[in-house]
Image (tube, grey):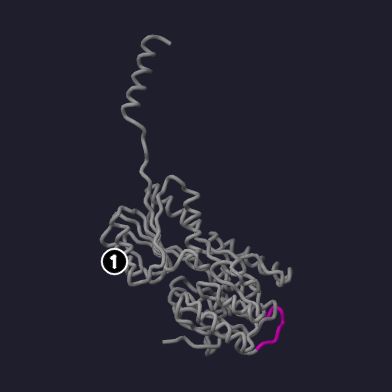
Amino acid sequence: MSRIVRQLFLTLIILGLAAGPVCAEKLKVAFVFLSTINDMGWTQAHYDGMKYAQEKLGDKIEISYTENIKAPDAERVIRDYASQGYKLIFGTTFEYMDPMLLVAKDFPDVAFEHCSGYKTGPNMGNYFAKMVQGEYLAGYMAGLMGYKNVGTVATNPIPEPIRGINAFTHGLLTGLDEAKVEHGDTVNTVAWLKAWRDPINETTVADTLSKRGHDLIRQMADTPDSSIAACNNKVPAIGYGSNAAAFGAKCALVSTMWNWGPYYVDTIQQVLDGKWKPREYYEGFNQDMIKLSSFSEAVPQAVQDKVMKKLEMMQQGEDISLEGPVADQAGKVMIPEGKRPTVPELMTMQWLAQGVKGTLPQ
């Protein structure tokens, strides 16, 4: 090495040491959860998605979360995170929509993401998953197996559960007709909790429906209690949100499950890359936003194969979950033959499909 080159090399080393190591600042990400992270349902699914993002993105991010936050306290918690320098905040339930929008207006340099709502802003987007696809498949499976007197433990009478009930019933009728099972005008009786999570009433309602002769209990609440109650009455169930069988409902034939992890990774990476923009995101099996659990041994292989064939169609982008014709309870065609509802129509759905017994509470 020549004297000049050696001197240049030493100079570069000294300059490097003087500058010190370059450390990229971690992106601070916050999650606000409706219930506890071990509720065995809705919140646990979001928490699992958060942990997935943490594993995938590692040292690039710093994550905090607050659990068990009800609507009246949401604005305070979201505002606190924004004030503390968190640059991306996820609000994981419908009730956080308006509080988050208020805070977003005061912190234009923070990215806000709201789950299941319909309002957006210059720095607030919303996201949700097409659980209607999973509900259609669960109903289709039940119909193929001959269940024709289902009892549904429903949550709140807003568009999200309503379209789920309609998709499940549409799938149920499709399966019954395909299996050539005779059935009455109504095949799905709906009882409303008027709550997302109410373990005592979930158990009571499922117990009542079971004892009234319903041959299958469909869980819609955020906990598996209604499925567990069905099992205790030796009536099969369909789980919702997370795998009900894994939480004690061994009679669950299948569960429709949220899968938030891929979305959280993608959104956080967009913020890291400086490419994030608010969007209205609504995808299903095609983007791995939802899953079906493994089937119970009680589900015949031939039925499983038929359900999985339709799932593969949805993975390719063909959404048949509410493909017409679909009529309302009065027989009026709401979705014409061969047509599918638009996203705005799904987000504002306020009618129950033919085949459903029950009314929408005021």
Residue that label 1 marks: 102
Magenta residues (range): 176-183
Q: Is residue 316 above or below residue 340?
A: above
**Percent x, y for residue 344?**
43, 72
Q: Is residue 4 left or right of residue 241?
A: left
Residue 238 occupies which quadrant of the picture? bottom right
Magenta segment main secondary structure: loop
Name the quarter where the C terminus is drawn: bottom left
* Position in image of residue 290 (x %, y %): 55, 64
Q: Residue at x 29, y 66 (%)?
A: 102
Identify the residue at horizontal 63%, vertical 85% (top origin).
214
Q: Amino acid under label 1?
A: Leu
Q: Secondary structure at mark 1?
A: helix
Looking at the rendered image, the quarter that the N terminus falls into is top left
Image coordinates of residue 260 in percent, x first then y, are 50, 60
Res. 252 image quadrant: bottom right
